[in-house]
Amino acid sequence: MNGSESFYKTVPAVRLIVMEHPEAAAALCRILKESGYRTSSSPDFGEPPAYLVLPPSRLGEVRGETVPFVLSAEREWPGFRSEKFARCVIDSAFSGDRRSIPAEKLVTYSAESDSADFTARNIRKTDEGVVFEIVGVGVIGRVRLADEKQIEPCLIAACAAVSCGIPFADVLGSLNRLFSAEEKVYSETAFGVS
């Protein structure tokens, strides 16, 4: 071994993403995988993935070192420390206490309010399904889905993916493939529920 090589192997930290919405978690896992990241939805991962995506109820099962990265919650969880996460993705209508989340960490979404960071706009039903635009701060893109029920999970996954540093264009491409009108149904879920 020469002087320029390190004796110690550097193991990258596993970035923890906590998501309450199973369909959004499944979509996020797919976006991350299509972006080249190894992703796991099991706390018993072998080789460390880049991202570990779990529901809040499974956090106690995590073995190994993780870095709290993105939290997407639909309600408050007693004893849960949201301030430890780099980003917190929540519905703009979230009724819980936001005071513990610093403003620079907060990313909001909504299908109804224009005050959110990411909104679903111009929702139109078509013969193939539904088309809408995700409008964010400085970005806009069209998404085609098989069903209107997929809008919210798609919007949550988009917010989380952008919070992870995935380019918005890549997020849109993945979502359009993921929820394509030809497939009609997206059956894979991140939490093992069909």
Image (tube, helix red, strand yellow):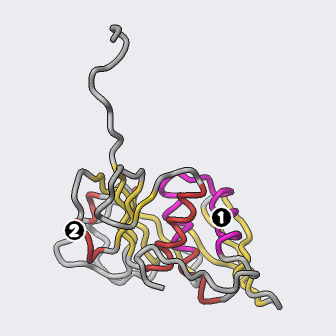
Horizontal side of 146 relative to 21 (left or right) equals: right
Q: Say few, some or many: other residues with alpha carbon within 10 Å of mark 1 (under 14 / 14 to 19 / 20 or more).
A: many
Q: Eyeballing the image, is 165 above or below 123?
A: above
Closest to the observer, 35 or 87: 35
Query: Which residues, given as a range, are shown in magenta?
Result: 155-178
Secondary-structure class at tag 1:
helix
* Residue, far left: 79
* Residue at 19% in and 69% down: 60
Q: Is residue 93 magenta?
A: no
Where residue 163 sits in the image (x, y, percent)? Answer: 48, 57
> Label 1 belongs to which residue?
174
Asked if the magenta segment contains residue 166, the reply would be: yes
Task: Name the residue beneath numbered marker 2.
Answer: 61
Circles 2 and 1, Cβ within 8 Å, touching? The answer is no
Mark 2 to mark 1: distance in Å?
A: 30 Å
Magenta stretch: dominant secondary structure: helix
Residue at the extreme top of the image, as rendered:
3
Q: Indicate the position of residue 185 as horizontal and vertical percent values.
A: 64, 85
- Of labels 2 and 1, earlier in sequence is 2
Secondary structure state at the residue bearing disc 2: helix
| Label 2: how many Cα within 10 Å (few below 14, some 14–19, many 20+) | few
Q: Quadrant of the N terminus?
A: top left
Which residue occupies 24% across, 63% down?
62
